[in-house]
Structures are given as structure tokens and as C-alpha cells.
Amino acid sequence: KNEVEQSPQNLTAQEGEFITINCSYSVGISALHWLQQHPGGGIVSLFMLSSGKKKHGRLIATINIQEKHSSLHITASHPRDSAVYICAVEDGGSYNTDKLIFGTGTRLQVFP
Amino acid sequence: DADVTQTPRNRITKTGKRIMLECSQTKGHDRMYWYRQDPGLGLRLIYYSFDVKDINKGEISDGYSVSRQAQAKFSLSLESAIPNQTALYFCATSEDPGQGLTDTQYFGPGTRLTVL
């Protein structure tokens, strides 16, 4: 069983829909990251969070440490949001290493 | 100009050849990382470095070596390439916020390596 599981693996949506991508993990963590990988391959960090909720534009990330679960929400989705979204956790046992354990990603396609 | 650059962006080579992938950053970060990405798998850590004199193996270091020539440069070498090293390779950097804390990682554009 992977230490970081994402669901769904693939997601299609119509422009304007509200999107939710889920991430569950099995290890104790010190932080969780959400990343976006563009169709061309480049990876951009969206959020790093260890508790609560963060918002940036139309993107919202939440985390529930007790339930070992995080969600990434996209409001008013747009075709330019089409990408692979990757969840990664920092193992709380790996003190001060920034070593991340990555999920396999959720491929999102938003159609006009 | 991009903060984290990788060269080459694409490379096709033959089994047994020595290959070097280079990463440079202008962000002034101490920490640098090399990852590989394979279809259907998450990114996996090959090597990481916290400063010029500190290099550590990741989960899949066999068959790879690295060199941290300066704070800004971190190179990955495949001494004798084999076909199952065909993958997308990413370099990343991050700050050291100290006190055991973590920080955002900034990724290079990736190098697509094919070993025939």
C-alpha cells in the first residue's frame, strides 16, 4: 500500500465546476505539499501546509491531521487548470530533511 | 530567466554510456534535490544535498552519483546508463528555514532521458 494515496486518479470537468482532489496518507507528517505539473512537464508548488486551510486565488487546500487527509479544491474551474495535481508529504520522522513522499497524481482535464 | 535550470532538456543515449545531468539555481538556496519520475509512479528521491559538503542518498540512489560543485550547482551522473533509467529527471531546491522546519521546493523544468 502506498504511503500517499490520491483520488481520483483521473478527473474531467466542465468549465466553471467546483473540483475536489483528495489525498490520504498513512505516516505521521510534519507538512503536506500540493504541486501542479503542467502538460509540458514543469512542476510548481501550490501549497505547503501543516494544519487548517490555505487559499490562493481559486485554489483552497485543507488538511485534517487527525484523519490524515487533505483536499485540494478548485473553484470556478477553467481549462487552464488542466494539469496533474500531486500531493506530497514530509515524513514527520525525517527531522529537517525536506524529504517528500509523493502520491502518483490526479490528472485533471477541464473542458470549455 | 528561470530560477532553476536543467541541462540538457532532452537526451537520448545508449546502454553503457556515461551521462551527466546538470542543475543550476539562482535562488541562493542551500538545499538541492534530484528526483526521477516514471509513468504511474510518484516522484522518487535519488540524492539530496543540504550544502556543498553535505550529500545524502535518497531512496533510489543505486546506479547514480552526484556532485555539488557550488551552492548553485548540483549534477547527477549515470556512470553506465541502462534502459530502466529512462525517465523524467527533476532537480529541485529549497531554503533551510532552520529549527527543523520545512520549506517549499522549487523545481527545474525536467530532463527527459531515454536510454536505448
Image (cartoon, grey):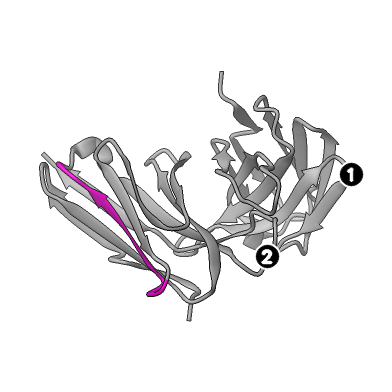
Residue type, mark 2 in image = Ser
* In this rendering, position of residue A97 left or right of residue B37: right
Residue A30 at x, y percent in the picture: 56, 62
Q: Residue furthest top?
A: B1
Which residue is found at the position 37% from the left and 52% from the top?
A85
Which residue is found at the position 33% from the left and 56% from the top?
A62
Q: Residues within 10 Å of mark 1 (few under 14, many from 20)?
A: few
Q: Secondary structure at mark 1?
A: loop
Residue type, mark 1 in image = Lys
Question: Which region of the structure is painted magenta?
Answer: A66-76
Q: Is residue B19 visible?
A: no
* In this rendering, position of residue A100 left or right of residue B100: left
Q: Tell which of A95 and B6 is nearer to you.
A: A95
Residue B86 at x, y percent in the picture: 61, 55
Say which mark, if any, is on residue A94. 2
Q: Quadrant of the C terminus of chain A?
A: top left
